[in-house]
Image (cartoon, rainbow, N blue to C red):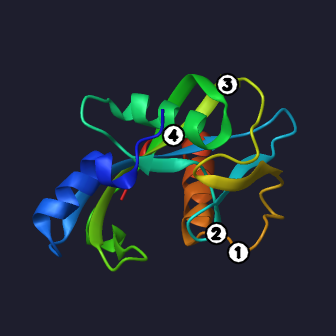
Amino acid sequence: MTLSWSDSYFGQLRALAGDRTLLLTATRVVARDEAGRVLLIQRADNGVWSVPAGAMELGESVADCASRELWEETGLRAAELTPFALHTGPAYTSANMFGDTYQHFVVLFRADKWHGELVRATDETTDAGFFPAAEPPEPLSRTVAETLADLASFEANGQLVVK
């Protein structure tokens, strides 16, 4: 079940905090098909293509959050996840389309195994598909290139990327 923004933890916290910058714990998931193409979703709120991602809810672990976001945005269920990067600090502060500012703490996961049928449109997405990393659709989220670069670094040396 997908929560509405106002019912979500961060929606409720935002209502209480007003315009203060909030720390937001979130996950991002890279899933690839057997041809090595990257799963991208087109967000319903702004039309931008991105990897599945979202904020952690109370009572979840970061792995639970990653699994839930992948399922909510694509219909795919993660069977095995590997963390490969942490994005933290002031460089990861941004405002959303409503002008609300968040400093993000994002745990990036690779979905090593997943199952199910890809759902191209959900409550949160208008399209989804697997694309060659060198040929993504536009407009593309600015986070995708950094995410894929960090995954390549992790896969090359086995070291968690921490920023």
Q: Nearer the viewer, residue 65 or 3?
A: 3
Mark-to-mark CA distance, 2 and 1:
5 Å
The answer to which quarter of the image holds residue 13 is bottom left
Q: According to the image, label 1 marks what residue?
A: 139
Is residue 55 shown left or right of residue 42?
Answer: left
Q: Is residue 56 above or below residue 34?
A: below
Mark-to-mark CA distance, 3 and 1:
26 Å
Q: Nearer the viewer, mark 3 or mark 4?
A: 4
Q: Are marks 3 and 2 in contact (CB under 8 Å)?
A: no
Q: Nearer the viewer, residue 2 or 159?
A: 2
Checking the image for residue 48, the label placed there is 2
**Circle 1 SS class:** loop
Q: Is residue 3 above or below residue 64?
A: below
Q: Nearer the viewer, mark 3 or mark 2?
A: 2
All told, the count of numbered labels is 4
**Circle 4 SS class:** helix
Mark-to-mark CA distance, 3 and 4:
13 Å
Checking the image for residue 114, the label placed there is 3
- Give the amino acid at mark 1: Pro
**Circle 2 SS class:** loop
